[in-house]
Amino acid sequence: MNRTTIKLADGRQLIYYDAEPGKDRSAVDRRVLPPVSTSSEVRYDPLLDSWTIVASHRQNRIYLPSAQDCPFCPTRDGHLTEIPADDYDVVVLENRFPSLFGDQVLDHGAGPAGGSEWRQPGSGRCEVVCFTSKHDASFSSLSPGRAALVLEAWTQRSAELSELPAVEQVFCFENRGAEIGVTQTHPHGQIYAYPFVTPRTHRMIASATSYRDRTGRNLFDDRLAREQHGERVVASSPSWTAFVPFAARWPYEVHLYPNRPAPDLLALDDEARSEFADLYLDLLGRFDRLFDRPAPYISAWHQAPTRTGRELFACHLELFTIRRTDDKLKYLAGSESAMEAFANDIAPEAAAQRLRELAS
Protein backbone atom coordinates (compact mmCIF):
# COMPACT_ATOMS: atom_id res chain seq x y z
CA MET A 1 0.00 0.00 0.00
CA ASN A 2 1.26 3.47 -0.87
CA ARG A 3 -0.06 6.67 0.70
CA THR A 4 0.21 10.25 -0.61
CA THR A 5 -1.15 13.34 1.16
CA ILE A 6 -1.94 16.63 -0.60
CA LYS A 7 -3.84 19.83 0.17
CA LEU A 8 -6.94 20.90 -1.74
CA ALA A 9 -7.54 24.50 -2.87
CA ASP A 10 -9.26 25.47 0.39
CA GLY A 11 -6.63 23.83 2.61
CA ARG A 12 -8.45 20.57 3.31
CA GLN A 13 -6.44 17.37 3.46
CA LEU A 14 -6.76 14.62 0.83
CA ILE A 15 -5.02 11.24 1.07
CA TYR A 16 -4.54 8.83 -1.83
CA TYR A 17 -4.33 5.16 -0.88
CA ASP A 18 -2.84 3.20 -3.77
CA ALA A 19 -2.48 -0.55 -3.97
CA GLU A 20 0.91 -0.16 -5.68
CA PRO A 21 3.60 2.54 -5.53
CA GLY A 22 4.53 4.66 -8.49
CA LYS A 23 1.23 6.44 -9.17
CA ASP A 24 1.64 10.09 -10.15
CA ARG A 25 -0.10 12.14 -7.44
CA SER A 26 1.30 15.54 -8.41
CA ALA A 27 -1.98 16.91 -9.81
CA VAL A 28 -2.98 20.19 -8.15
CA ASP A 29 -6.51 21.26 -7.24
CA ARG A 30 -7.13 24.10 -9.72
CA ARG A 31 -10.48 25.21 -8.31
CA VAL A 32 -10.96 28.54 -6.55
CA LEU A 33 -12.61 27.72 -3.22
CA PRO A 34 -13.30 29.78 -0.11
CA PRO A 35 -11.93 28.46 3.19
CA VAL A 36 -14.14 25.99 5.03
CA SER A 37 -16.56 27.89 7.24
CA THR A 38 -18.85 26.19 9.75
CA SER A 39 -21.32 27.10 12.45
CA SER A 40 -21.20 23.74 14.22
CA GLU A 41 -21.95 23.48 17.89
CA VAL A 42 -22.92 20.68 20.24
CA ARG A 43 -25.79 21.11 22.70
CA TYR A 44 -26.26 18.98 25.80
CA ASP A 45 -29.56 17.27 26.64
CA PRO A 46 -29.63 16.65 30.41
CA LEU A 47 -32.69 14.38 30.19
CA LEU A 48 -30.93 11.94 27.88
CA ASP A 49 -27.37 12.69 29.02
CA SER A 50 -26.32 13.11 25.39
CA TRP A 51 -25.12 15.68 22.89
CA THR A 52 -26.85 16.94 19.74
CA ILE A 53 -24.83 18.33 16.83
CA VAL A 54 -26.27 21.54 15.36
CA ALA A 55 -24.76 22.23 11.92
CA SER A 56 -27.06 24.62 10.08
CA HIS A 57 -24.43 25.47 7.46
CA ARG A 58 -24.90 22.02 5.90
CA GLN A 59 -28.23 23.01 4.39
CA ASN A 60 -26.31 24.27 1.35
CA ARG A 61 -24.30 21.12 0.63
CA ILE A 62 -24.44 19.48 -2.80
CA TYR A 63 -27.48 17.22 -3.16
CA LEU A 64 -27.69 14.28 -5.60
CA PRO A 65 -25.69 15.74 -8.48
CA SER A 66 -25.72 14.08 -11.89
CA ALA A 67 -22.90 11.73 -12.82
CA GLN A 68 -21.42 14.51 -14.98
CA ASP A 69 -21.26 16.81 -11.94
CA CYS A 70 -20.17 14.22 -9.35
CA PRO A 71 -17.62 15.77 -6.95
CA PHE A 72 -16.05 12.37 -6.12
CA CYS A 73 -15.22 11.29 -9.66
CA PRO A 74 -11.66 11.99 -10.82
CA THR A 75 -10.83 15.27 -12.55
CA ARG A 76 -11.15 14.53 -16.26
CA ASP A 77 -11.96 16.37 -19.48
CA GLY A 78 -11.94 19.77 -17.82
CA HIS A 79 -14.38 18.80 -15.07
CA LEU A 80 -12.71 19.87 -11.81
CA THR A 81 -13.74 17.76 -8.82
CA GLU A 82 -12.72 17.08 -5.23
CA ILE A 83 -10.14 14.60 -6.60
CA PRO A 84 -7.42 16.38 -8.65
CA ALA A 85 -6.01 13.14 -10.12
CA ASP A 86 -7.49 11.58 -13.28
CA ASP A 87 -7.82 8.20 -11.55
CA TYR A 88 -7.44 6.71 -8.07
CA ASP A 89 -7.78 3.54 -6.02
CA VAL A 90 -9.08 4.79 -2.63
CA VAL A 91 -9.22 8.40 -1.45
CA VAL A 92 -9.89 9.94 1.97
CA LEU A 93 -10.58 13.67 2.15
CA GLU A 94 -11.92 16.17 4.65
CA ASN A 95 -15.60 16.86 4.11
CA ARG A 96 -16.28 20.21 2.44
CA PHE A 97 -19.46 20.55 4.52
CA PRO A 98 -18.50 19.01 7.87
CA SER A 99 -20.86 18.50 10.81
CA LEU A 100 -17.82 18.71 13.10
CA PHE A 101 -14.81 20.95 12.62
CA GLY A 102 -12.11 22.29 14.90
CA ASP A 103 -9.79 21.25 17.69
CA GLN A 104 -11.29 22.70 20.87
CA VAL A 105 -11.58 19.99 23.53
CA LEU A 106 -15.10 19.54 24.89
CA ASP A 107 -15.28 20.58 28.54
CA HIS A 108 -17.38 17.81 30.08
CA GLY A 109 -17.30 19.41 33.52
CA ALA A 110 -18.41 22.91 32.61
CA GLY A 111 -22.11 22.31 32.21
CA PRO A 112 -24.53 24.07 34.55
CA ALA A 113 -26.71 22.00 36.86
CA GLY A 114 -30.34 21.20 36.12
CA GLY A 115 -31.94 21.95 32.78
CA SER A 116 -29.99 25.10 31.88
CA GLU A 117 -28.65 25.45 28.37
CA TRP A 118 -25.15 24.15 27.75
CA ARG A 119 -23.48 24.47 24.36
CA GLN A 120 -19.94 24.21 23.09
CA PRO A 121 -18.18 24.39 19.71
CA GLY A 122 -18.79 21.37 17.48
CA SER A 123 -15.17 20.34 17.32
CA GLY A 124 -13.93 17.17 15.64
CA ARG A 125 -13.52 16.10 12.06
CA CYS A 126 -15.61 14.65 9.24
CA GLU A 127 -14.01 12.81 6.34
CA VAL A 128 -15.21 11.15 3.14
CA VAL A 129 -13.85 7.78 1.99
CA CYS A 130 -14.19 7.20 -1.76
CA PHE A 131 -13.99 3.45 -2.36
CA THR A 132 -13.33 3.60 -6.10
CA SER A 133 -13.07 6.07 -8.96
CA LYS A 134 -15.89 4.24 -10.80
CA HIS A 135 -19.09 6.23 -10.36
CA ASP A 136 -21.51 3.36 -11.05
CA ALA A 137 -19.76 0.78 -8.88
CA SER A 138 -20.63 -0.30 -5.35
CA PHE A 139 -18.67 -1.67 -2.43
CA SER A 140 -19.96 -5.16 -3.23
CA SER A 141 -18.42 -4.91 -6.71
CA LEU A 142 -14.93 -4.19 -5.39
CA SER A 143 -12.19 -6.79 -5.64
CA PRO A 144 -11.00 -8.35 -2.36
CA GLY A 145 -7.77 -6.44 -2.77
CA ARG A 146 -9.58 -3.12 -3.08
CA ALA A 147 -11.82 -3.93 -0.08
CA ALA A 148 -8.68 -4.71 1.93
CA LEU A 149 -7.27 -1.33 0.91
CA VAL A 150 -10.42 0.36 2.23
CA LEU A 151 -9.96 -1.50 5.52
CA GLU A 152 -6.40 -0.19 5.69
CA ALA A 153 -7.65 3.36 5.09
CA TRP A 154 -10.30 2.98 7.82
CA THR A 155 -7.66 1.66 10.20
CA GLN A 156 -5.07 4.35 9.54
CA ARG A 157 -7.59 7.17 9.77
CA SER A 158 -9.08 5.73 12.98
CA ALA A 159 -5.62 5.60 14.53
CA GLU A 160 -4.66 9.12 13.51
CA LEU A 161 -7.97 10.76 14.35
CA SER A 162 -7.96 9.05 17.75
CA GLU A 163 -4.76 10.93 18.56
CA LEU A 164 -6.43 14.34 18.19
CA PRO A 165 -7.03 15.89 21.64
CA ALA A 166 -10.61 16.92 20.79
CA VAL A 167 -11.68 13.45 19.60
CA GLU A 168 -13.38 10.96 21.94
CA GLN A 169 -14.64 8.41 19.39
CA VAL A 170 -14.11 7.55 15.72
CA PHE A 171 -16.94 6.15 13.62
CA CYS A 172 -16.46 4.71 10.10
CA PHE A 173 -19.66 4.05 8.15
CA GLU A 174 -21.33 3.77 4.77
CA ASN A 175 -24.84 4.88 3.81
CA ARG A 176 -25.98 3.21 0.56
CA GLY A 177 -29.19 4.02 -1.30
CA ALA A 178 -31.58 6.92 -1.76
CA GLU A 179 -33.93 5.40 0.82
CA ILE A 180 -31.21 5.82 3.44
CA GLY A 181 -30.83 9.50 2.56
CA VAL A 182 -27.55 9.64 0.68
CA THR A 183 -26.71 12.98 -0.94
CA GLN A 184 -24.02 11.56 -3.27
CA THR A 185 -24.45 8.38 -5.30
CA HIS A 186 -20.74 7.81 -5.96
CA PRO A 187 -19.65 4.79 -3.84
CA HIS A 188 -18.28 6.30 -0.67
CA GLY A 189 -18.44 6.20 3.10
CA GLN A 190 -17.69 8.64 5.88
CA ILE A 191 -15.69 8.95 9.07
CA TYR A 192 -16.90 11.03 11.99
CA ALA A 193 -14.45 11.92 14.75
CA TYR A 194 -16.70 12.99 17.62
CA PRO A 195 -15.82 15.27 20.57
CA PHE A 196 -17.97 13.01 22.79
CA VAL A 197 -18.78 9.33 23.23
CA THR A 198 -21.90 8.59 21.18
CA PRO A 199 -25.11 7.59 23.00
CA ARG A 200 -25.15 4.06 21.51
CA THR A 201 -21.60 3.37 22.62
CA HIS A 202 -22.21 4.94 26.02
CA ARG A 203 -25.13 2.56 26.57
CA MET A 204 -23.17 -0.49 25.43
CA ILE A 205 -20.30 0.29 27.79
CA ALA A 206 -22.73 0.87 30.66
CA SER A 207 -24.34 -2.53 29.96
CA ALA A 208 -20.93 -4.21 29.73
CA THR A 209 -19.85 -2.61 33.00
CA SER A 210 -22.99 -3.78 34.79
CA TYR A 211 -22.58 -7.29 33.34
CA ARG A 212 -18.95 -7.48 34.48
CA ASP A 213 -19.91 -6.32 37.97
CA ARG A 214 -22.59 -9.02 38.20
CA THR A 215 -20.77 -11.92 36.57
CA GLY A 216 -17.08 -11.08 36.38
CA ARG A 217 -17.25 -11.76 32.64
CA ASN A 218 -17.15 -9.74 29.40
CA LEU A 219 -20.57 -9.16 27.84
CA PHE A 220 -19.28 -8.97 24.26
CA ASP A 221 -17.29 -12.21 24.63
CA ASP A 222 -20.27 -14.09 26.04
CA ARG A 223 -22.61 -12.72 23.38
CA LEU A 224 -20.33 -13.88 20.58
CA ALA A 225 -19.87 -17.29 22.20
CA ARG A 226 -23.64 -17.79 22.36
CA GLU A 227 -24.15 -16.80 18.73
CA GLN A 228 -21.13 -18.50 17.11
CA HIS A 229 -22.66 -21.93 16.62
CA GLY A 230 -26.37 -21.10 16.66
CA GLU A 231 -29.17 -20.87 14.14
CA ARG A 232 -28.64 -17.17 13.52
CA VAL A 233 -25.14 -17.50 12.04
CA VAL A 234 -25.10 -16.28 8.44
CA ALA A 235 -21.46 -16.83 7.47
CA SER A 236 -18.09 -17.30 9.15
CA SER A 237 -14.37 -17.73 8.68
CA PRO A 238 -11.63 -18.80 11.12
CA SER A 239 -11.33 -15.18 12.29
CA TRP A 240 -14.87 -13.78 11.89
CA THR A 241 -18.49 -14.63 12.70
CA ALA A 242 -21.46 -12.94 11.02
CA PHE A 243 -24.83 -13.43 12.69
CA VAL A 244 -28.29 -11.94 13.03
CA PRO A 245 -28.58 -10.81 16.66
CA PHE A 246 -31.19 -12.42 18.91
CA ALA A 247 -33.05 -9.12 19.40
CA ALA A 248 -32.47 -7.64 15.93
CA ARG A 249 -34.27 -4.34 15.41
CA TRP A 250 -34.08 -4.16 11.62
CA PRO A 251 -35.70 -6.50 9.05
CA TYR A 252 -32.31 -7.81 7.92
CA GLU A 253 -29.49 -7.00 10.33
CA VAL A 254 -26.11 -8.73 10.53
CA HIS A 255 -23.36 -8.19 13.08
CA LEU A 256 -19.81 -9.11 12.12
CA TYR A 257 -17.43 -9.84 15.02
CA PRO A 258 -13.75 -10.81 15.02
CA ASN A 259 -13.38 -14.10 16.88
CA ARG A 260 -10.39 -12.68 18.75
CA PRO A 261 -11.70 -9.56 20.52
CA ALA A 262 -10.21 -6.16 19.67
CA PRO A 263 -11.30 -2.74 20.95
CA ASP A 264 -10.86 -1.06 17.57
CA LEU A 265 -9.74 -1.61 13.99
CA LEU A 266 -6.11 -0.94 14.83
CA ALA A 267 -6.10 -3.91 17.22
CA LEU A 268 -7.29 -6.48 14.65
CA ASP A 269 -4.71 -9.22 14.12
CA ASP A 270 -3.20 -10.11 10.74
CA GLU A 271 -5.46 -13.12 10.22
CA ALA A 272 -8.60 -11.06 10.76
CA ARG A 273 -7.36 -8.42 8.33
CA SER A 274 -6.56 -10.97 5.64
CA GLU A 275 -9.96 -12.68 5.95
CA PHE A 276 -12.14 -9.58 6.26
CA ALA A 277 -12.52 -8.61 2.60
CA ASP A 278 -13.84 -11.94 1.30
CA LEU A 279 -16.36 -12.34 4.12
CA TYR A 280 -17.59 -8.75 4.02
CA LEU A 281 -18.01 -8.81 0.24
CA ASP A 282 -19.94 -12.06 0.62
CA LEU A 283 -22.32 -10.39 3.10
CA LEU A 284 -22.85 -7.37 0.84
CA GLY A 285 -23.56 -9.70 -2.06
CA ARG A 286 -26.28 -11.41 -0.04
CA PHE A 287 -27.85 -8.03 0.71
CA ASP A 288 -27.75 -7.23 -3.02
CA ARG A 289 -29.71 -10.44 -3.71
CA LEU A 290 -32.34 -10.00 -0.98
CA PHE A 291 -34.82 -8.07 -3.12
CA ASP A 292 -35.56 -7.22 -6.73
CA ARG A 293 -32.95 -4.45 -6.48
CA PRO A 294 -29.83 -3.93 -4.32
CA ALA A 295 -30.84 -3.29 -0.71
CA PRO A 296 -30.29 0.16 0.76
CA TYR A 297 -28.15 -0.28 3.84
CA ILE A 298 -26.10 1.26 6.60
CA SER A 299 -22.78 -0.36 7.42
CA ALA A 300 -21.36 0.84 10.73
CA TRP A 301 -18.09 0.11 12.50
CA HIS A 302 -18.49 0.25 16.28
CA GLN A 303 -15.13 1.02 17.89
CA ALA A 304 -14.20 1.69 21.49
CA PRO A 305 -13.87 5.34 22.54
CA THR A 306 -10.36 6.72 22.44
CA ARG A 307 -9.95 7.01 26.22
CA THR A 308 -12.72 5.20 28.12
CA GLY A 309 -14.28 1.73 28.26
CA ARG A 310 -11.67 0.16 26.01
CA GLU A 311 -11.08 -2.89 28.21
CA LEU A 312 -14.79 -3.81 27.98
CA PHE A 313 -15.61 -3.00 24.36
CA ALA A 314 -15.39 -5.29 21.31
CA CYS A 315 -14.98 -3.74 17.88
CA HIS A 316 -17.60 -5.04 15.44
CA LEU A 317 -19.49 -4.09 12.30
CA GLU A 318 -23.27 -3.77 12.09
CA LEU A 319 -24.89 -4.04 8.65
CA PHE A 320 -28.62 -3.52 8.20
CA THR A 321 -31.24 -2.54 5.64
CA ILE A 322 -34.44 -0.59 6.10
CA ARG A 323 -36.12 -2.59 3.32
CA ARG A 324 -38.36 -5.46 4.51
CA THR A 325 -39.87 -6.62 1.19
CA ASP A 326 -39.37 -5.79 -2.48
CA ASP A 327 -41.77 -2.85 -2.18
CA LYS A 328 -41.91 -2.00 1.53
CA LEU A 329 -39.57 -0.09 3.83
CA LYS A 330 -39.22 -0.27 7.58
CA TYR A 331 -40.13 3.25 8.67
CA LEU A 332 -39.12 4.57 12.07
CA ALA A 333 -42.59 5.65 13.10
CA GLY A 334 -44.00 6.57 16.52
CA SER A 335 -42.77 3.70 18.69
CA GLU A 336 -39.27 3.64 17.19
CA SER A 337 -38.67 7.36 16.71
CA ALA A 338 -40.37 8.71 19.82
CA MET A 339 -39.72 5.90 22.32
CA GLU A 340 -36.82 3.91 20.80
CA ALA A 341 -38.96 0.78 21.17
CA PHE A 342 -38.46 -1.21 17.98
CA ALA A 343 -40.92 -3.67 16.45
CA ASN A 344 -39.37 -6.01 13.89
CA ASP A 345 -41.56 -7.50 11.14
CA ILE A 346 -39.21 -10.43 10.49
CA ALA A 347 -38.06 -12.99 13.07
CA PRO A 348 -34.26 -12.90 13.40
CA GLU A 349 -34.06 -16.67 12.82
CA ALA A 350 -36.03 -16.32 9.57
CA ALA A 351 -33.81 -13.45 8.45
CA ALA A 352 -30.69 -15.52 9.12
CA GLN A 353 -32.11 -18.46 7.18
CA ARG A 354 -32.95 -16.21 4.23
CA LEU A 355 -29.46 -14.70 4.20
CA ARG A 356 -27.83 -18.15 4.38
CA GLU A 357 -29.83 -19.19 1.34
CA LEU A 358 -28.46 -16.24 -0.65
CA ALA A 359 -24.85 -17.44 -0.68
CA SER A 360 -23.33 -16.98 -4.13
Image: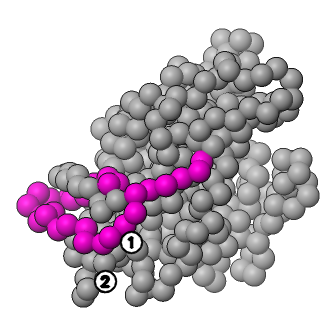
CA–CA distance between discs 2 and 1?
Answer: 11 Å
Question: Is residue 30 rendered to the left or right of residue 54?
Answer: left
Whether residue 18 appears in magenta in the rendering, the answer is yes
* Residue 272 visible from this viewpoint: no
* Residue 329 visible from this viewpoint: yes
User: Identity of the amino acid at label 1?
Assistant: Phe
Image position of 10 with respect to 262: above or below: below
33 or 23: nearer the viewer: 33
Name the residue at 76% across, 52% down.
249
| Mark 1: few/some/many CA within 10 Å (<14, 14-19, 20+) | many
Residue 69: give x, y in percent of width and height.
42, 83
Name the residue at 17% across, 68% down.
27
242 or 116: nearer the viewer: 116
* Label number found at residue 344: none
Q: Which of disc 1 and disc 2 is earlier in sequence?
A: 1
Name the residue at 50% across, 69% down.
285
Q: Nearer the viewer, mark 2 or mark 1?
A: 2
* Label number found at residue 72: 1
| Mark 2: few/some/many CA within 10 Å (<14, 14-19, 20+) | few
Image position of 264 with respect to 317: above or below: above
| Residue of label 2 | 79
Question: Is residue 107 rendered to the left or right of residue 163?
Answer: right
Residue 134: give x, y in percent of width and height.
34, 77
User: Identity of the amino acid at label 2?
Assistant: His
Name the residue at 75% across, 13% down.
214
Residue 163: give x, y in percent of width and height.
39, 30
Predominant SS of the magenta segment: loop
Q: Secondary structure at mark 2?
A: loop
Highlighted magenta segment, given as a residue range: 11-40
Residue 108: give x, y in percent of width and height.
64, 23
